[in-house]
Amino acid sequence: MTPRELTPKGTPAVVAVRRDGVIFWCSPAATELLGLSARELRGRSIGEFLTRESGGEPGPDPGPDLRTPGVHTAYPRQGDSRAAEIAYRVVPVEGMGESLVLAARTAWAGSREETETLLEGPVAQREIDVAVADLAHTTSGPGSRRYQERRLRLARVHDASVRIGSSLEVTETAQELADLLVPDLGDLVTVDLAEAVVVGDEPPRMVGGGRPHMLRSAIASASEAWLGKILMPGAPYPVLPDSSQLREIQMGEVVTMDRASVVAALDDEELMEQLVPPFAHSVTVSPLIARDLILGTVSVWRDEPPDSFQEDERKLLTEITSRAALGIDNARRHNREQRAAVTLQERLLPSATTSSAAVSTVGIYRPAGKGAGIRGDWFDVITLPSLRVALVIGDVVGHGLSATATMGRLRTAIQTLADLELDPPELLAHVDELVQRLAAEGPGDQDPVGATCLYAIYDPLTRQCTLASAGQLPAVAMRPGGPTEFIDVLPGPPLGVGGVPFESRTLELEPGSVLVLFTNGLLEADHDSETGMRRLRARLATFNDQGRSLEAMGNSLLSDLGTTPTDDDVAFLLARTRAVPPDSVASWEYPAEPDSVALARRDIMDQLAAWGLEAQSMDTELVISELVTNAVRYGGGPVGVRLIRDGVLICEVTDSSNTQPRLLRANATDEGGRGLFIVAQCTTRWGSRYGLRGKTIWTEQPIT
């Protein structure tokens, strides 16, 4: 049995409408005739459902004629059958300024004449009397049905209000508030917030008229007919004239006004269209106050006079807006911390693009969204001596400012250790010890300290790359014209666990190969890392073209993630390898004998002449003489010498000793101790590194 079959065909439907045609009451028969509940009909124009023309789509006509006496014909907005013809009669309600619309389908009554008799006969009069009695029923009596309905409605709103503020997004919380209040407390609700609040700052204190520096943040309506031309979410608030009501709101008072008072306060037709709904008869404005700051306002519009807003409704609105203001303020403060953390994180990260003799790189970082807080992902490109480069990717445990601070400390530590030219496993072991100390130093209630990290060193002279991992996902190698594959490195535990050594892997990379280091945020779209890694490798394989720039690859990977905010940070580093030409490198080996110093000077001078670098001869001759002399005297053989020409001139001397060279300031009467001092004066920088056997002292000089 369909709903319409439950209604006796001899009972006309009745709806009560205001002068503008907006429905504010309806009988059970009316809900069945129009196919919507009373709650869905209330606040909507009768013209949304009925038209004077036969056909389906809304036409230019204003809907049923509500002014001319007699019985008229209308048709549903949907459907094109003459069988759906509806006869209706308009009956003004004396002393109330409203009208009753009685309606029945012509097909139900049997004929047009029988339908008119039904709408004008005793049955119709009985329905009119029932409707008038129900409309005249006051809400002051605790035992009345309308009073009980209102109490239930307010209780429902109160219970639902406890869920406001669960989101850490300002605009989401504002929309939750608007949705909660419609339709139980108002026909249309707007939430307007200070521009500063939306971006996470404290709002300015406003007094009087002028530009309020506010944004329409949320809107909810019982019907689209209520929207008209009013401001939509995201639109800035217009300049407001000064008024006593505006100042009361700015002082934190709840203000209720009728339409005439709003019109007088605004005194501008364009402002009326932007701020006042077309069917509104009254509005109650409640400020959103938290920590003595007025964050914005909530405006509750009704199609009823101001005195319809009862005291218990006013108290409930104040309670709800207070709770919502706390939620909005929490979201605002979270946004401010998030913004500060993102700014700090971005300041701590290196330049997004770098170029050196070893690699060209592009690094990309995108912070987490959806209120998750940044997670401390980072990348780094560290220039090492002898044209080598270190590539780093890491992910800190935790989120927010604490994760950012930990990331900054770890990045600084890795840069410092990288200057010591430790191999990747040894460097990660030192960082692991540091993280354990940081965890032990912190209070017991702080976020756990830990991180994952992958550290790689690439040498453009040997074209070899050595990698070690502390719980980090493997890097990808894209060989030009060859396969795209993950670099299989046995991962050690995350930093801070301790007790397990780190292992490394060394592989040779052709010039033009691309290394991809990434954090797990790049795989967030997939449910498990294995699926995500297979998808990533397949995607990178489509980029394996030397003609495609690193920037284009990075942008493509970002676009694959979409624009929806993610729960985790995303960081990845793309590095295209380069190689130093063989004719830019010369090397020799000498025995640990005094004559080797002169031989080394001669070979170096000849090589500089072959390269056209005679201008470097004097300083380079001094540097080689001092370093080879020290190697012969204190280090032991064989003594290796290497000269590298690139943007700078690099000299390297290797011996079999592990003794750390020290720069001393010799006294005037000392016969020795000036060798490294002379080296430091002739070069821009110098240092040493250790190998499996012995050490190498290197220097750099600018090429003039």
Image (cartoon, rainbow, N blue to C red):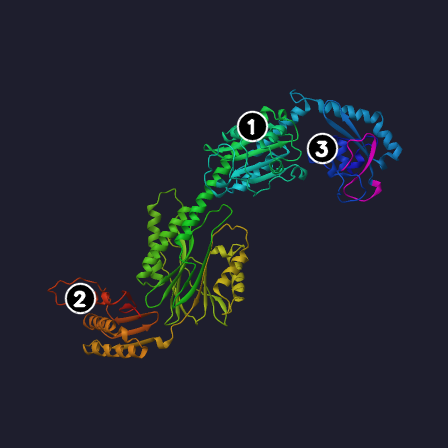
User: Which residue in the protein does label 1 denote?
Assistant: 255
Alpha-carbon span between mark 1 and mark 2: 86 Å
- Asked if disc 3 and disc 2 are in contact, CB closer than 8 Å, the reply is no
Q: Is residue 107 left or right of residue 670?
A: right
Q: Nearer the viewer, residue 93 or 206?
A: 206
Q: Is residue 571 above or below residue 629?
A: above
Read off the residue under disc 3: 20
- The residue mark sitting in front, 3 or 2, is 3
> What residue is rendered at 52% in x and 56% in y?
528
The residue nearer to you, when weighing 88 against 385, is 88
- In what element is the residue under mark 2? loop
Quadrant housing the C terminus = bottom left
Who's the residue at 60% across and 40% down the image? 231
Residue topped by disc 2: 674
Q: Specify the amino acid type for callout 1.
A: Val
Q: Earlier in the sequence, mark 1 or mark 3?
A: 3
Most common SS among magenta residues: loop
Q: CA distance from mark 3 to mark 2?
A: 100 Å
| Residue segment shown in magenta | 63-83
Q: Quadrant of residue 635?
A: bottom left
> Residue 175: x, y in percent?
57, 39
Q: Amino acid at mark 2?
A: Arg
Depth check, front residue: 70 or 464: 70
Magenta span contains residue 616: no
- Disc on the earlier residue, 1 or 2: 1
Tell me the amino acid under the disc marked 3. Asp
Q: In the rendered view, tell whether residue 104 sits above or below residue 585.
A: above
Farthest front residue in view: 268
Give left or right: position of 57 versus 154: right
